[in-house]
């Protein structure tokens, strides 16, 4: 079964054809990053307009004259004016083709990315712990079976990607922050030639994102399954102010140490929370998706954490970590396999919770 997947929840206009949930036949991603760069973050109106301008070209280039059996599109979570463009295009296309339409949860789709282009059957890796780390979300999801999702942990404030992006803006390193911080932090770490103790003692002691029990924002979740990055962000701001501002720190050659310390605090928080959750019950796999899963240090640390727990680490290929249409088509196929026609739905849902994959439920 060939499914066309369309994704426009944030700042990528993307479409892809995936065969039987895994084989990527075509994959087209138009990134709007240069349009948002001057603002240091995604501007919803600009995103929406750019999706409108590009959607036709991206979809027809992904189709490349091929026929598809179904159409799938992200219906949430994401920016309403952005979601609406891709979802309406999918609706129109499905009607014109007389093909079924699948509404897909963006976070569930990120958790499908490790299975793209691998030939793996996701059902062989359940039960799993899902970790979705992106610019808008950081969440831990219990996956007792494929297509079954329960959010068991999350960040109480900023997402990991947002924390990278805000720090980068503060330090004058540009947008998006993740890739540049990853690169600069790697260079700093490489100075210690594998001596982890020396590397760690070189770092600025930023807070590690632990959450206190009894905080209202937990909303019923276990504090051990949650993280918080707002204290880290404030701590970075104070450090920069105390040392004369970003320009003075750059002139003193201090940016690499700060960036490596900040990244290590985020990675430690995510890796330690993941380790606690993997320790709470046996699981076959740790399934990771989202733009921040491109982070080289996070990939390394998650490898250690998974090995300690005996779970297999499943990471996406780098080209599927960021937003793309292939993950939308892939998850739609497996929802169809697991749920049949109930996997279809009707409208966008910007604040969609993970596990609420179908608006008709
Ligand atoms: O999943 P994604 O493409 O879009 C959302 O759904 O949010 O994630 C984008 C986020 C941005 O915050 C970006 O800074 C971050 O992923 N990112 C990284 C890296 N590459 C992208 N964060 C850390 N290290 C990276 N190498
Ligand atoms: Zn995403």
Image (cartoon, rainbow, N blue to C red):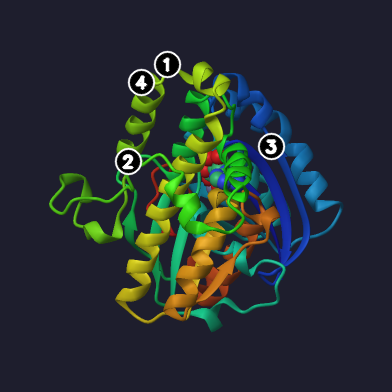
The answer to whether the residues at label 4 and label 2 have Cβ atoms under 8 Å apart is: no
Task: Report the Cα–Cα distance between label 1 and label 3.
Answer: 36 Å
Q: Sequence order check: which comes first, mark 2 or mark 1?
A: 2
Q: Residue shown at 45%/42% (left/top)?
A: 261
Instruction: Bin the neighbour count of mark 2 within 10 Å (Cα to Cα): few under 14, some 14-19, many 20 and up.
Output: some
Q: Sequence order check: which comes first, mark 4 or mark 3?
A: 3
Q: Sequence order check: which comes first, mark 3 or mark 2?
A: 3
Q: Residue shown at 37%/61% (left/top)?
A: 272
Instruction: Bin the neighbour count of mark 1 within 10 Å (Cα to Cα): few under 14, some 14-19, many 20 and up.
Output: few
Residue 157 image label? 2
Reply above or below: 126 against 164.
below
Q: Is mark 1 within 8 Å of ligand 1?
A: no
Instruction: Bin the neighbour count of mark 3 within 10 Å (Cα to Cα): few under 14, some 14-19, many 20 and up.
Output: some
Q: Is mark 2 within 8 Å of ligand 1?
A: no
The answer to whether the residues at label 1 and label 4 have Cβ atoms under 8 Å apart is: yes
Task: Report the Cα–Cα distance between label 2 and label 1.
Answer: 27 Å
Reply above or below: 188 against 23.
above
x then y, percent, for residue 306: 48, 72
Between 244 and 270, the residue placed more toward the observer is 244
Between marks 1 and 3 in the image, the one whose residue lies nearer the viewer = 1
Task: Report the Cα–Cα distance between label 4 and label 3.
Answer: 37 Å
Q: Callout 3: helix, strand or loop?
A: strand
């Amino acid at each position: 079964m060939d499914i066309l997947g369309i994704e426009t929840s944030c700042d990528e206009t993307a479409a892809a054809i995936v065969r039987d949930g895994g084989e990527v036949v075509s994959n087209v991603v138009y990134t709007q990053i240069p349009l948002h760069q001057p603002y240091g973050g995604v501007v919803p109106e600009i995103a929406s307009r750019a999706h409108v301008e590009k959607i036709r070209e991206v979809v027809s280039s992904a189709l490349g004259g091929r026929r598809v059996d179904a159409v799938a599109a992200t219906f949430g979570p994401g920016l309403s004016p952005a979601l609406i463009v891709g979802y309406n295009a999918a609706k129109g296309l499905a009607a014109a083709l007389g093909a079924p339409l699948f509404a897909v949860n963006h976070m569930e789709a990120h958790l499908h990315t490790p299975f793209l282009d691998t030939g793996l059957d996701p059902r062989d890796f359940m039960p799993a712990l899902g970790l979705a780390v992106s610019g808008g979300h950081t969440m831990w999801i219990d996956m007792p079976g494929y297509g079954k999702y329960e959010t068991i942990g999350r960040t109480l404030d900023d997402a990991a990607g947002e924390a990278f992006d805000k720090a980068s803006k503060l330090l004058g390193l540009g947008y998006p922050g993740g890739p540049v911080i990853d690169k600069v932090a790697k260079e700093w770490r490489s100075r210690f030639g594998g001596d982890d103790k020396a590397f760690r003692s070189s770092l600025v002691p930023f807070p590690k994102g632990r959450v206190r029990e009894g905080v209202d924002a937990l909303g019923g979740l276990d504090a051990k399954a949650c993280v918080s990055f707002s204290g880290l962000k404030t701590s970075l701001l104070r450090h920069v102010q105390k040392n004369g501002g970003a320009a003075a720190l750059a002139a003193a050659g201090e940016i690499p140490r700060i960036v490596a310390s900040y990244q290590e605090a985020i990675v430690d928080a995510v890796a330690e929370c993941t380790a606690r959750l993997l320790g709470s019950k046996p699981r076959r796999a740790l399934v990771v998706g989202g733009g921040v899963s491109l982070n080289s240090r996070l990939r390394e640390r998650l490898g250690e954490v998974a090995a300690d727990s005996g779970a297999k680490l499943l990471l996406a290929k780098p080209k599927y970590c960021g937003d793309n249409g292939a993950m939308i088509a892939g998850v739609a196929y497996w929802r169809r396999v697991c749920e049949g026609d109930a996997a279809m739905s009707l409208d966008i849902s910007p604040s969609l919770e993970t596990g609420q994959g179908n608006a008709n439920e």
